[in-house]
Amino acid sequence: MIISLENFIPLPLTGISREESGFWESGGVVLESPGSYLLTAPSGKGKTSLLSMICGVRKDYRGSILIDGTDIRQYGPMDWSEIRKRKISCIYQGLELFDELTALENIQLKNGILGYKTRDEIREMAQALEMDNFLERETGKLSFGQRQRIAIIRALCQPFGFLLADEIFSHLDKKLEKLTFSLISRECAKNRSGLLLTSLHPLGKFNFDKHFIL
Amino acid sequence: MLRKILWRAYGKSHITGAVAGSLIGFILLLSITQFYFEMKHVLGTNEDLINPEFIVINKQVSVLESLELRTTGFTEAEIETIASQQFVQEVAGFISNDFALSAYTESANFPDFYTDLFFEAVPDEFLDVKSDDWKWKPGQSTIPIILPQDYLNLYNFGFAPSQGLPQISPSLIRLVNFKISIYGKGKQAEYNGKIVGFSNRINSVLVPYAFLSAANKEFGKGQAPRVSRLVIVSKNPADPEIAAFLQNNGYETIKENLKSSRLNIILKFIISFLGGLGILIIFLALLVFILSFQLIINKSADKIRKLSLLGYHYREISRPYILSLSLIISLIALVTSLAMIALKNLFVSFSGEWGMELTNGIHPVVILGGILLLVFITLVNIRAIVKQTKSFSR
């Protein structure tokens, strides 16, 4: 799967960040799967905007985003539903969990669409992130770091060609950071899929194929 | 799980109100429509044998007539005067039998019965008889007869109870065959009599015009026909001028007629008013329905957005709402059907006491109309739900 950006820039950024990094409005940023990409920038530089634009949630940009050569502006609701079910999985910074459901119910809400993971596989992923004791808890009563890990597990409960992860380490300690990255890497390798991870700081300890700095 | 997330208790009171409103509107509209068909049926079998525009008049009977110093017959000149009144469209005289006539029963299932009788007839176009039985051709041995409703009432509510005899419904009496004997000019003939209807408007025993004129020719004494009653066609029988004219000339009519035509208008007005009210209530309920669902969906806007981020299509998301709607509509359909059946039964139990005959079951127009209306409401709501859900999807 190839995601490419052509002369792309989120509209709120036009006129503010006239390019130092060469990322915005460049001839071609190409993200290919399998491949891992890190995008670091201080707050307000457009990391989150970019991810939600690739996912079709926001459309206020100039230029174009192509998925496997097709301009995503051509996609209708049915196409986006398919893409979000099978092609691109996204861990949003806002997590987008349902607070009134339990952690497990939140995961099942996603997993139930395709029945992608078994109950044991979900429990095993929760174990890996030290969340297995919290699956039956109401999501609204978990800490932000715990909810972050639920959102990560949920995002892995579908097939995908690309995983977009928006500042997912923000509330995790070093140990959990490592556990999480290895779980994500393992799932991406299984899917032979690409990974685009954003972060406020460089993540020197992990290996990426390419590092963009905004 | 979608239902658990999306269908919260928001606006429950609105939905309850909308359901109650729809129920009231539906039951009102459907029962009024059914009532309309019942009334049409009742009036059709009992009263409308003569159109409401028809008025039957005769002269008052005083001592002079009893002493045979004067007759109650209308002269040619009098008929012409009546015909020239501006409220009169057409006028025709009744003809009566010019021969002796008696009726008797020969049935084992019916008490023995014998009576001298008379017949009258008016031209068929003055009768509003829909019955196919209402015709006579030379050589036909069965004579169709229309009796005054009062005769049946006299029997059912006066004679039968006092003699310990069973009461008879109009449809039952139509099954009774009796014999008619005619004598005149030294000849005699036997016919079968068959009652085809009852009239509240004419206090007479009516037979087809063709039969009576033929029989008068064959058995009659050859006297000039005496016209003792007239039937008048008027556009507006409620016209007060008619009453004044009749009084000034010493003519009589069944006042009920003039009153009932006015009642008829009032009844029609009330039926249309209540029907209109039913439609209005249904319309308002439909509005409350749509608004309640919009409120519920609006409150779930963020949940719908999150679900669409997970890959749920807006059609999938709207499904729980449509399911709830379907349940509510089914509930309305069920309660309305039960209410209609209960009302019908109630009406049937009253109708016996009132001496009326009702239609069988619920009129197909009522059933079909109810179903179409429910389908319409469901479709409009589904459309609104899907549109709303789509607008919150990303």
Image: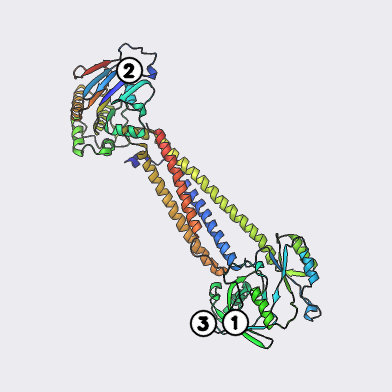
Examine the image and state in which quarter residue B150 appears. bottom right
Q: CA distance from mark 2 to mark 1?
A: 110 Å
Which mark's residue is nearer the viewer, 3 or 1? 1
Which mark's residue is nearer the viewer, 3 or 2? 3
Q: Quadrant of the C terminus of chain A?
A: top left
Task: Say above or below: B330 vs A87.
Answer: below
Label 2 crowd (10 A; few <14 / some 14-19 / many >=20): few
**Label 2 lies in what chain?**
A
The amino acid pointed to by label 3 is: Asn
Q: Which residue is mark 1?
A: B191
Circles 3 and 2, Cβ within 8 Å, touching? The answer is no
The amino acid pointed to by label 2 is: Ser
Q: Which residue is mark 3?
A: B109
**Camera-nearest residue between B329 and B136:** B136
Q: Which residue is mark 2?
A: A43
The amino acid pointed to by label 1 is: Tyr
Circles 2 and 1, Cβ within 8 Å, touching? The answer is no
Instruction: Name the spot of residue A1 as percent of width and height, x first.
Output: 25, 26
Q: CA distance from mark 3 to mark 1?
A: 19 Å
Examine the image and state in which quarter residue B112 appears. bottom right
Give the side of residue B196 with respect to residue A103, left or right.
right
Label 3, secondary structure: give it. Answer: loop
Instruction: Name the spot of residue B206 as percent of width and height, x first.
Output: 64, 74
